[in-house]
Amino acid sequence: MKVTKAQRSQIKVPILLMGASGSGKTLSALLIAKGMLEKIQPDLEEAKQWENIGVIDTEHQRSSLYVNTEHDGVTIGSFTKVDLEAPFTADRYEEAFTLLKQAGCQVIIIDSTSSAWSGEGGILNKVDEYGGQIGDWKKVGPDQQKLLNLLTRNDVHVIATARSKQGVEVTRTDTGKVKVEKVGLKPEMKDGTEYEFAITFQLYENHIAQAMKDNSSIFAQPQVLDREVGRKIVSWAELGVDLVAKMRERKIKAQDAIVKMTTESQAVLLKLAALELKLGKPELKDWTMDELTKGYKYLAGVKAKEAAQSAAQQKTEAQA
């Protein structure tokens, strides 16, 4: 144990995608991985980038269904994979992971981790085989730790997926009546495991993802997970780029540009007031970057139209 100075260093990011069946976990993982490779190896040809993405598929080879399909403006290529079948033990996950690393994969997708928890040969299965008593959980402790290390302590980027189910809570009202309430989506994995990841996304049925934990502080708003997400993660993790600071700088520049237009055009000033009223945000500092971008383009069009009308009027007056 010693005292040291904290320094920003390159890291390999463990990412978790949680969601119910059909929420888009596998496809999202592939697109994020592709974006990461585009940033890590920008000069590598696309086919090679796909080869450097590894997939541990426990879902009946489902990931292969996406090959040669187009999403997010790119055709999913032939990635490297290991089809893992039961028993879904920690040792077999580790073996599959090692094979993909030996194949040169830079990003490894584990689809899914839920099989290691609730599948045949998984943690719950082992506890039952030991007798299902509280003390039997100690016997599977080494397996749980091995899986956790595989997911979060590595020299490659890891994207893991986990199935989620709607949780319920049964309570009684003051009158003694039974009350059943939905309490949110619960991943099929050991409680608290989702917080071991650097970035954890919850995907919903509309394929929109919400960051439940985000050490990067990049993903504040719900969004579709695409290649740009992967590029941003690598910029933060490997290149040390402070994307939050960059976004703040971009917002300030956009705000200044809009304010400048209002000083040059009365029409822009009036339209800006209307936009602020519509958004319910009377101050530009409260606008999102997307709102600032769209607002600037719209107001620039207003200014250009006003300038064209003014020029036409001057021409008419000159001819008269």
Image: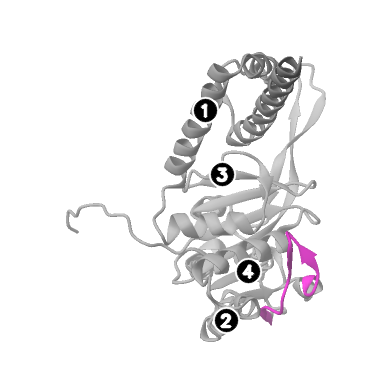
Depth check: 152 or 199 in front?
199
What is the crowding at mark 3: few (fewer than 14 residues within 10 Å), some, or many (at least 20)? many
Q: Please report contact status of discs 4 and 3: CB closer than 8 Å, yes or no.
A: no
Which of the two labelled residues, at mark 2 and mark 3, occupies the earlier sequence position? 2
Confirm whether the magenta stretch covers residue 180.
no
Q: Residue at x 52, y 50 (%)?
A: 195
Q: Residue at x 62, y 18 (%)?
A: 281
| Position above or below: 95 against 14 | below
Dot 2 amino acid type: Leu
Dot 3 amino acid type: Phe
Q: Nearer the viewer, mark 4 or mark 3?
A: 3
Q: Quadrant of residue 272?
A: top right
Residue 219 image label: 3
Mark 4 to mark 3 CA distance (whole Å): 22 Å
Which of the two labelled residues, at mark 1 and mark 2, occupies the earlier sequence position? 2
> In what element is the residue under mark 1?
helix
> In what element is the residue under mark 3?
loop
Residue 71 image label: none
Q: Please report contact status of discs 4 and 1: CB closer than 8 Å, yes or no.
A: no
Q: Residue at x 62, y 50 (%)?
A: 201
Q: Which residue is mark 2?
A: 100
Residue 194 in picture, x, y percent from top left = 56, 52
| Position above or below: 25 against 245 | below
Q: Which residues are magenta?
A: 66-82
Q: Please report contact status of discs 1 and 3: CB closer than 8 Å, yes or no.
A: no
Q: Which residue is mark 4?
A: 110
Q: Nearer the viewer, mark 1 or mark 3?
A: 1
Q: Which residue is mark 1?
A: 255
